Image (cartoon, coloured by chain):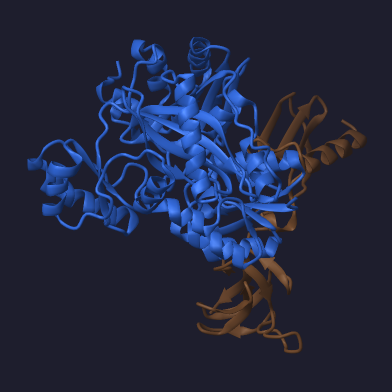
Chain colours: A blue, B brown
Amino acid sequence: MFKKILIANRGEIALRVIRTCREMGIKTVAVYSTADKDSLHVRFADEAVCIGKPASTDSYLNIPHIMAAAEITNADAIHPGYGFLAENAKFSQICADHGIKFIGPTPYMINNMGDKITAKETMIKAGVPVVPGSGGLLESIEQAKDLAKNVVGYPVIIKATAGGGGKGMRIVWEESEMERSYNSAKAEAAASFKNDGLYMEKYVEEPRHIEIQVAGDQYGTVCHLSERDCSIQRRHQKLVEESPSPFMTPELRKAMGEAAIKAAQAINYESVGTIEFLVDKHRNFYFMEMNTRIQVEHCVTEEVINFDLIKEQIKIAAGEKISGANYEPNMCAIECRINAEDPYNDFRPSPGKITYLNTPGGHGVRVDSHVYAGYVIPPYYDSMIGKLITVARTRDEAIDTMYRALSEYVIEGIKTTIPFHLQLMQNEDFRSGNFTTKFLESFKMS
Amino acid sequence: MDLKQIHELIKIVNKSNIGEISIEDKDGKVTIKQKEEQVVTVAAAPQVYNVAPQQHTAAPAPALPAAPASKSEATAAPAPSNTITIKSPMIGTFYRKASPDKPPFVEVGTMIEPGKVLCVIEAMKLFNEIESEVKGKIVKVLVDDNSPVEYDQPLFLVEPS
């Protein structure tokens, strides 16, 4: 087992990894930019190394600085968290070259699933259902129009091949919109990912976003840990996640679970990961993409199957075998992402100092957060300041517990999305499980 | 208040993160300040307590001890106002000499100017010469030879000329 793990990340996920390492008796090294000097993950780690200026490219994305920090602290493994370098094949390779275990997949696995077009091709070969689409990069607006009209069928969605986080995506409802959508998607992709390659897919209307958690060891065994429903999204960013999905049936879970395992086996996947599917109203499901990392919403699965996914991830990286058994939820859990954003002003970011903080507690409540009273949220990174997770025997009770816990969650000095979540928990359609990824488009704050 | 009580108070303040404490009773007033200026004064005044906490600790401290060398929180005394602090631009191992058998690049008293090599910082088998960007005299060397340094860590104090 590793003696010392360096966490190449910040905020709540860095804290999350440090906590599990503590329980496993593994020493921890935190890295931080000058803006994160007072961050909780820095204080909780056994050692901490400042790795650069606030901008991510100078610090959390700076591979030489992170490797130097691993070198001077003698870390034998690096946990990349999510975002930043978590799905950077070059970083995975550099760790391997330096004899430091990257707690995640190999460069081959990352590359295979990181490029969305290659991933789709791999899935088609593996017999996993995919959304019908262009099959390759789009070459021109004319070609796009031809494909949309004769092969895929409107409505279509144009996506960036190197994309993520909802950037570089445009839905096109009819031919007259194609030129404008094509050009703006291309420009946004170039700006966000330095890669303006686009591909096209059929736009699955009123889809639900249901993903399957998987885990694979170094010996070829893969298993699934059931689903999370992440349909509550704003501009393709998840706000609420839950397990089990209110739309799930035992047959659908079996079919999606098997497809997810096939997907992971197709690349001999090692570590934990997630296969994202779109599910239409007839319960047809289509592979969308695979995330070759631990995800923000992993806590939801942890609560319903009662496993520490970070611990499993570290054990797999250390060469342990998994049993191969699949896991189904035996509880109901919901997660609300608490962001420093103003829901009354179009979710405008609200960095600043937290003057007062009271975190909720009680039966069935979990808070994964790195903030504290007096903490100044830096403006350089994402706006998520915590995750509130509730778990209960039924979905209704989990929602009631969430509403109660949200009412206790007092954060002053900045604006947060707590008011939004409170209203959502009382929304009839949400409570009845009647929602798709389009739900938030028609949701208004009162 | 007798001497023994004052002695106990000093011990308590020393171990805590209180910056300054004043206690007054019918016999007088005792003020104890943290750090170098451990002044104890006694004067007549009515019974009043006030405590001034040190500025930065609003954050919770973890229950387990966590203060190894490489955490370098700024516990060093602040530099006198007429000196410049040269900070590390990178992470690695700090060396004062080009190789073990050579003399150090600079010592206290060495005059430096922009471009003068001050030290070498090694990371991943690459040795990087760190050059001065200022002109002046080395007043203090803050890091030991062959020790790890992090980004922005103070390395030298320089009196500019």
Q: Report the residue that reaches farthest toward the bottom.
A: B102
**Which residue is at a point 34% across and 20% down the rendered structure image?**
A435
**Which residue is at a point 28% across and 30% down the rendered structure image?**
A346
Q: What is the x, y in percent for residue A262?
A: 49, 41
Q: Nearer the viewer, residue A443 or A168?
A: A168
Q: Nearer the viewer, residue A403 or B128?
A: A403
Q: Which image quadrant for residue A277? A: top left
Q: What is the x, y in percent for residue A410?
A: 50, 22
Q: What is the x, y in percent for residue B60?
A: 65, 35
Q: What is the x, y in percent for residue A415?
A: 40, 29
Tally of marks:
0
Q: Is residue B138 above or below residue B73?
A: below
Q: Is residue B27 above or below residue B53?
A: above
**Which residue is at a point 54% across and 38% down the rendered structure image?**
A214
State left or right for residue A189 relative to residue A36: left
Quadrant where the C terminus of chain A is found in the figure:
top left
Q: Report the residue that reaches farthest toward the left.
A: A176
Q: Report the residue that reaches farthest toward the right.
A: B4
Q: Which image quadrant for residue B72? A: bottom right
State left or right for residue A10 relative to residue B62: left
Q: Which image quadrant for residue A25? A: top right
The answer to whether any part of residue A355 appears in the image is no
State left or right for residue A67 relative to residue A424: right
